[in-house]
Amino acid sequence: MSGLACFKNCGSVMVTGANRGLGLQLVESLVTGGFSPGKIIATARDPGSALKLNELAKNHPQVHIITLDVQSQEGIQKCAEEVHQLVQEEGLNCLINNAGVNVVANLQTVTAEKMIENFHTNAVAPLMITKAFLPLLKQAASRAPRGAVSMSIQRAAVVNMSSLLGSIELVSAEQMNNFNWYPYRTSKSALNMVSRCLAVDLEPDGILCVAVHPGWVRTDMGGSQAPLSPEESVSSLLSVLGGLSEKHHGSFVNYTGEPLPW
Ligand code: NAP
């Protein structure tokens, strides 16, 4: 079975920040690719203005839109309760922590406030969301049929949308010339550590956890110079996610499937 086809056997997938960019593309590719999961929970902080997402939900009843500002702890709890109502005892199979911001600042312009703002959305929120959804992820993991692959997105998984720019090993003078962004880069390094720690903590429950790099993509964040379209990035990424197993657990994976250095 191809990676993408694995999503057809997945009960539910939740994507944060699904109103534009890669989040919207993830939802669109999942519903239109012929391998839709049973339920797609697409969160957005202002669903009323998410026109394309609303259009998708209108044409595909498996798409459920829920309000979530990932910086709001109250909002996270409320969202978890709403998702519980939707998925009931089946739990949540795949959580994609996609929402992110790039607070651009170099050494001259960086401030404590800019660092904290970027950390909150990119590193703290994915951890708090995962924590709030843990009962639903555990519920899904516990329902795995006998003999099934021990870890997979069909069972239960947390996917953290990270970035190559968070890799400490890959920092070079050349890369810093082009992407001299202290808040963003450090927030993604922190997200990578969150992913590693979660991988250790969630392993006994059979919940897969990975950090992924979607490539450099033409979105509002990636800009018009990026080499990849959202469709290209997401089509490859979904194939990779669908094929994840315990051998990928706790790793940092490129959208093409290769392992990346931390
Ligand atoms: P984007 O086009 O700027 O979209 C960002 C998404 O995150 C939007 O839906 C935005 O919602 C949402 N978001 C931001 N803050 C939020 C909050 N507090 N609560 C809820 N939603 C919030 O970015 P993208 O390119 O699609 O990036 C998606 C993910 O991929 C990010 O984590 C990014 O770091 C990562 N990534 C992207 C690239 C790239 O080249 N594009 C490369 C590496 C990694 P609003 O519309 O409400 O602001």
Image (spheres, rainbow, N blue to C red):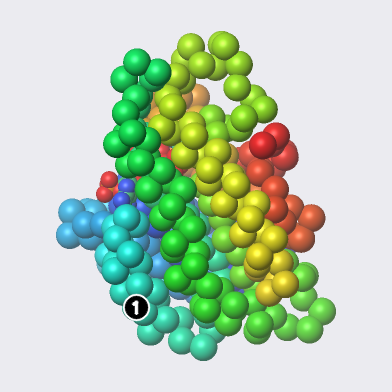
Left or right: 152 in relation to 102:
right
Percent from the top left, x then y, of residue 70?
A: 34, 57
Residue 95 versus residue 117: which sits nearer the camera? 117
Percent from the top left, x then y, of residue 23?
A: 41, 50
Q: Dividing the image into four quarters, tell me where ligand 1 lies.
A: top left
Outermost residue on the front side: it is 112
For label 1, the crowd category at 10 Å Cα-Cα, with few meaning under 14, some 14 to 19 and many 20 or more, is some
What residue is drawn where x is 77% and y is 75%?
148
Residue 82 versus residue 38: which sits nearer the camera? 82
Say which residue label 1 marks.
82
Left or right: 139 in relation to 79:
right
Residue 120 versus residue 238: which sits nearer the camera? 120
Outermost residue on the left side: it is 48
Left or right: 183 in relation to 136:
left
Q: Is mark 1 within 8 Å of ligand 1?
A: no
Percent from the top left, x then y, of residue 12?
A: 51, 72
The answer to whether residue 217 is above or below residue 29 is above
The answer to whether residue 203 is above or below residue 170 is below
Q: Quadrant of the C terminus?
A: top right
Percent from the top left, x then y, of residue 4?
A: 62, 56
What residue is drawn where x is 61% and y is 41%?
255
Identify the image quadrant of residue 189: top right
Q: What amino acid does circle 1 point to?
A: Glu
Q: Quadrant of the N terminus?
A: bottom right
What residue is drawn where x is 72% and y is 40%?
259
* SS for dot 1: helix
> Residue 70, can we see it?
yes
The answer to whether residue 250 is above or below residue 6 is above
Outermost residue on the bottom side: it is 89
